[in-house]
Image (tube, rainbow, N blue to C red):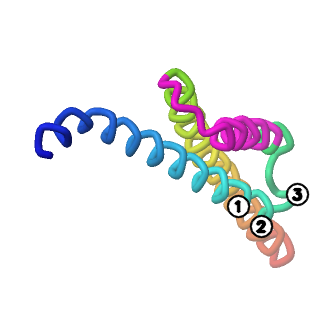
Amino acid sequence: MVADAQRHAAEDRRQREEVEARNHADAIAYQVERQLHDLGDRTPMHERARAENMMREIRQLVQDQSTDMARLRMIERLRRDLEANLAGIAVILDLLDRLTTLQREVEQWRRRS
């Protein structure tokens, strides 16, 4: 029984990695989708389109439930790209918020002058 478990350990580890990769990628896709929905029109159109394309690719790969390691590497790459895209959107929106605040402050300063 121990010998049988040892023989299957590598396969079990590979399957666990596959499931974890798919679950993590799907969770990131969901987070990005939710954030895009919450941000609405504030998200730059090109960033939204890029994120939507990556989400579509990830979901297709996850849905296929392939055991092909090349596909799993693709899922992982897309997940990293999507996370980077999400971070980029957050930076852009933070800058837009700061710009809006500065514009308000300038307008208030002008009214006082």
Whether pointer 1 and pointer 2 mark residues with C-beta atoms closer than 8 Å, the reply is: yes
Whether pointer 3 and pointer 1 mark residues with C-beta atoms closer than 8 Å, the reply is: no
- Identify the residue shown where x is 65% and y is 50%: 29
* SS of the residue under disc 1: helix
- Name the one closer to the observer, 33 or 93: 33
- Name the one closer to the observer, 47 or 30: 30
Q: Is residue 57 magenta?
A: yes
Q: Is residue 40 magenta?
A: no
- Identify the residue shown where x is 80% and y is 45%: 48
Residue 24 percent across, percent down from the top left: 51, 50
Q: Residues within 10 Å of mark 1 (few under 14, many from 20)?
A: some
- Name the one closer to the observer, 63 or 101: 63
Residue 23 percent across, percent down from the top left: 53, 51
* SS of the residue under disc 2: helix
* SS of the residue under disc 3: helix
Residue holding disc 1: 35
Q: Residue furthest left?
A: 2
Q: Nearer the N terminus, badge 3 or badge 1?
A: 1
- Side of 64 where 11 appears, left or right: left
Residue holding disc 3: 41
Residue 89 percent across, percent down from the top left: 67, 48
The answer to whether residue 109 is above or below residue 83 is below
**Front disc: 3 or 1:** 1
Q: Give, as a single range, the part of the protein colored magenta.
A: 49-69
Residue holding disc 2: 38
Type of amino acid at the residue the image marks with label 2: Asp
**Front disc: 2 or 3:** 2
